[in-house]
Amino acid sequence: MQKIGEITAADRGTLEVTFCRPEDCGHCHACDGGQKPTVLRLSSAGQACSVGDFAEVELPTGTVVKASLLAYALPVAGLMGGMALGSLRGNAWAAVGGAIGLVICLAIVALTEKNRKNNPKWQPTLVRIIPRTWFSKEATQESNETEEQA
């Protein structure tokens, strides 16, 4: 998965890249609905850049899938497994078992988060720096082509 964000700070080999969430993302209201940008800090790997340039950042698709499974599927599996085990003792125990299974799986995700956060395999990487002038050249070229066609 690749995304392009604007470089909002650059200091000693470290970049701060700001990504705006897509407008479609605002329909579920699970987050700030596209109103709050996502900020990412990463190494510039010796690439020259300045504030206002753009950065293309990549996170391998396999890593995105694994993170999604950890965040969503594992807690649901804990909830369902706990409910199944609790239901062996009765309906009231199914709810208790589900809650316990959910809490255990959420605790596992939280406790292992530090390892993933420090593991480079789970971190996004800088693919390239796109100078801000590139976008203005593209826009100028497109408007010239439109004027020529008219």
Image: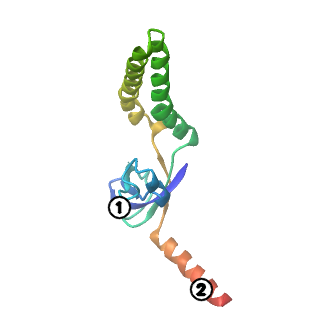
Label 1: few (<14), some (14–19) or many (≥20) C-alpha neighbours in 10 Å? some
Cα separation, mark 2 vs mark 1, equals 30 Å
Residue 146 location, quadrant: bottom right
Residue type, mark 1 in image: Thr
Residue at the spot x=39%, y=56% of the render?
A: 17
Residue type, mark 2 in image: Asn
In-front residue for pair 52/104: 104
Mark number for residue 119?
none
- Disc 1 on helix, strand or loop? strand
Residue 115 location, quadrant: top left
- Disc 2 on helix, strand or loop? helix
Question: N-terminal of the two: label 2 or label 1?
Answer: 1
Q: Which residue is mark 1?
A: 8
Q: Estimate the x, y position of residue 96 in percent, counting from the top left.
A: 38, 18
Residue 19 location, quadrant: bottom left
Q: Which residue is mark 2?
A: 144
Q: Estimate the x, y position of residue 84 in percent, counting from the top left.
A: 50, 16
Q: Residue furthest front?
A: 91
Label 2: few (<14), some (14–19) or many (≥20) C-alpha neighbours in 10 Å? few
